[in-house]
Amino acid sequence: MAAPRKYPDELRERATRMAVEARSDPAARAGALARIGKRLGINAETPRNWVTQAEVDGGVRPGTSTDDAQRIAELERENRELRRANEILETASASFAQAELDRRLK
């Protein structure tokens, strides 16, 4: 289960929108994320990470999108469950085979 988010989605969207607008203006670009973080009461690295992820999700920057990361996590979880089920089946099969051999030897 995923950890609860520290900041609400509305704050994330607002900060990302403000950062994209500020970064588009060359005069306000320097230190824009630090100013936005201070204005919203969050660490300056937080909006930087949000903007980076928004750029990845939008296809502007290379990387793993949020949807892809979520799908990968689901597949990894399913893979773990299937490996565990196979392990249980192999153990049960070996147990039944041993029981059959013991029965034949008597």
Image (cartoon, grey):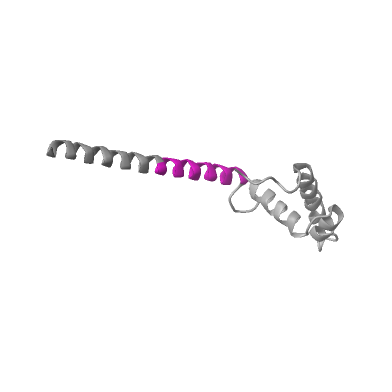
Q: Quadrant of the C terminus?
A: top left
Residue closest to the far left = 105
**Horizontal arrangement in the rendering, residue 62 relative to residue 91 (left or right):** right
What is the x, y in percent for residue 44? 78, 59
What is the x, y in percent for residue 38? 84, 58
In the displayed structure, 33 sits above or below 68; it is below
Prevailing SS of the magenta stretch: helix
Provide the residue span drawn in magenta: 66-84
What is the x, y in percent for residue 96? 25, 37
**Horizontal arrangement in the rendering, residue 39 relative to residue 72 (left or right):** right
Q: Nearer the viewer, residue 42 or 83?
A: 83
**Horizontal arrangement in the rendering, residue 30 relative to residue 70 (left or right):** right
Residue 68 magenta-drawn?
yes
In the displayed structure, 86 sits above or below 21; it is above
Q: Nearer the viewer, residue 54 or 88?
A: 88
What residue is at 81 percent from the left and 50 percent from the top?
18
What residue is at 75 percent from the left and 42 percent from the top?
9
Q: How many marks?
A: 0
What is the x, y in percent for residue 83? 40, 44
* Residue 25 in view: no
What residue is at 57 percent from the left and 46 percent from the top?
69
Q: Quadrant of the N terminus?
A: top right
Q: Nearer the viewer, residue 12 or 32?
A: 12
What residue is at 81 percent from the left and 60 percent from the top?
34
Q: Quadrant of residue 41?
A: bottom right
Q: Nearer the viewer, residue 37 or 91?
A: 91
